[in-house]
Image (cartoon, coloured by chain):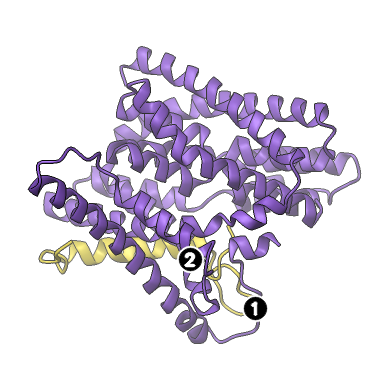
Chain colours: A yellow, B purple
């Protein structure tokens, strides 16, 4: 799955899967904190 | 050439902050197209309601894809948007992960077990069929391998991973990707029609789409065009299929290495772990959290909405995959093998799903 997030040539980098997992967990934490209660989806 | 179709950016030594900034215009464009799709769907529905018309509801998913398809094949996508648009695979994974909150662990194990059994049958069928067809059409053996992996497991990502594992030519992988993408685009529109014609239930259709449509994005979209419940099942079945990739790659890599045409594999367990789609573990983790009642009903609703928005960005990006002019430029041989193979796989998996639907009351 080649995307720009994955094409890191050097230095610190995470795979696309790790980015997706971290993002989803961060979003789940935000939802759990109650910040999204009033979002007009 | 396919590089353009997939919008794979060239690797350059750029600062992470610049890379992040370069993604913003494309992501905003995806969001705008997704929102436009939603707006068109709601407007048509409101117009039909106000005028007492019976217009079939066309989902925002389809509008989003049609808009991108039309733009990318006429005026083209300007360079500034390309890096951001290429992130749709990321949104797809984030969307599937968040979807984990809608599955209690029992559901995952039950459906996961059923789809795993069906996936094993599908993989065996797809390999046998594609290998036979490749021989009949006298395709190069490595091109046949790539087509077999693309149709048996998970489309483009599987082909790219296999290309590295078996040292296949760029040209072969370009052909295989073009063929698999063209077929996936056709399946996207034909599967829901066939599903409605056969009066398949949401679960049965979702399973069929997840088993037979290549590429996770296209499989999920095909499910979403049917119903939201079908999209959920399609994503789960396709994710189970994706989880097979390590084993399939290992098998192929060992086969070609034994013939001296690929690098030998040292640590097989490390190879499997490296190729295993890690986001599947994240999906399970979120599913476990939901099962443990970490989220209340309102929070589960918010997670579902976030997942829907992530899919919206994905669907807007899917249309960009299909560059009609570039597909025309490809030869017909690989496409014919791919199409014949996919048609057979679609029929075999449909039969399997119909049997499973009867046996498990799907």
Q: Is residue B57 found left or right of B96 in the rendered image?
A: left
Few, some or many residues within 10 Å of mark 1 (<14, 14–19, 20+): few
Q: In which quarter of the image is residue B1?
A: bottom right
Q: Is residue B173 found left or right of B263 in the rendered image?
A: left
Residue B155, compared with residue B115, is above or below; it is below
Residue depicted at 40% across the width and 45% down the height = B221
Measured Cα–Cα span from mark 2 to mark 1: 20 Å
Residue A41 percent across, percent down from the top left: 18, 61
Residue depicted at 24% across the width and 47% down the height = B290
Taking the image as drawn, is residue B279 in sight?
A: yes
Residue depicted at 31% across the width and 30% down the height = B202
User: Viewer-proximal residue, B193 or B167?
Assistant: B193
Residue B44 percent across, percent down from the top left: 21, 51
Of the numbered discs in the image, which one, if any, rests on residue B87? 2
Q: Is residue B17 found left or right of B14 in the rendered image?
A: left
Q: Quadrant of the C terminus of chain B?
A: top left
Q: Which chain carries label 1?
A: A
User: Viewer-proximal residue, B227 or A4?
Assistant: B227
Judged by depth in the image, the label closer to the viewer, 2 or 1, is: 2
Residue B314 percent across, percent down from the top left: 41, 57
Residue B319 percent across, percent down from the top left: 48, 56
User: Viewer-proximal residue, B41 or B318?
Assistant: B41
Q: Which chain carries label 2?
A: B
Mark 1 residue element: loop
Q: Quadrant of residue B183?
A: top right
Of the numbered discs in the image, which one, if any, rests on residue B170? none
Q: Mark 1 points at which residue?
A: A10
Mark 2 residue element: loop
């Amino acid at each position: 799955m080649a995307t720009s997030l994955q094409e890191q040539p050097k230095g610190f980098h995470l795979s696309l899967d790790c980015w997706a997992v971290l993002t989803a967990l961060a979003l789940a934490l935000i939802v759990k904190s109650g910040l999204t209660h009033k979002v007009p989806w | 050439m396919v590089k353009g179709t997939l919008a794979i950016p060239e690797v350059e030594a750029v600062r992470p902050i610049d890379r992040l900034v370069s993604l913003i215009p494309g992501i905003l464009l995806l969001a705008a197209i997704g929102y436009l799709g939603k707006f068109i769907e709601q407007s048509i529905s409101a117009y039909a309601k106000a005028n007492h018309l019976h217009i079939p509801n066309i989902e925002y998913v389809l509008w989003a894809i049609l808009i991108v398809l039309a733009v990318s094949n006429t005026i083209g996508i300007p360079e500034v948007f390309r890096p951001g648009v290429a992130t749709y695979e990321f949104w797809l994974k984030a969307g599937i992960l968040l979807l984990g909150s809608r599955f209690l662990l029992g559901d995952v194990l039950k459906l996961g077990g059923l789809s795993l059994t069906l996936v094993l049958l599908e993989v065996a069928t797809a390999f046998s069929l594609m290998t036979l067809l490749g021989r009949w059409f006298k395709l190069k053996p490595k091109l046949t391998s790539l087509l077999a992996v693309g149709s048996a497991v998970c489309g483009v990502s599987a082909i790219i991973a296999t290309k590295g594992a078996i040292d296949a030519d760029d040209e072969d992988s370009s052909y295989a990707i073009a063929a698999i993408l063209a077929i996936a685009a056709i399946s996207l529109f034909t599967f829901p029609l066939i599903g409605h014609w056969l009066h398949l239930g949401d679960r049965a259709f979702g399973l069929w789409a997840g088993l037979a449509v290549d590429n996770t994005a296209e499989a999920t979209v095909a499910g979403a065009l049917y119903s939201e419940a079908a999209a959920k099942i399609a994503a789960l079945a396709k994710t189970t299929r994706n989880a097979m990739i390590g084993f399939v790659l290992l098998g192929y890599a060992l086969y070609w290495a034994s013939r001296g045409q690929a690098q030998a594999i040292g640590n097989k367990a490390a190879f499997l772990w490296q190729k295993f789609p890690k986001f599947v573990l994240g999906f399970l983790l979120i599913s476990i959290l939901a099962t443990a009642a970490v989220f209340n009903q309102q929070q589960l609703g918010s997670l579902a909405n976030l997942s829907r928005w992530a899919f919206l960005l994905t669907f807007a990006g899917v249309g960009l995959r299909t560059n009609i002019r570039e597909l025309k430029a490809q030869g017909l041989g690989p496409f014919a093998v791919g199409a014949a193979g996919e048609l057979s796989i679609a029929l075999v998996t449909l039969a399997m799903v119909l049997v499973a639907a009867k046996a498990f009351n799907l």
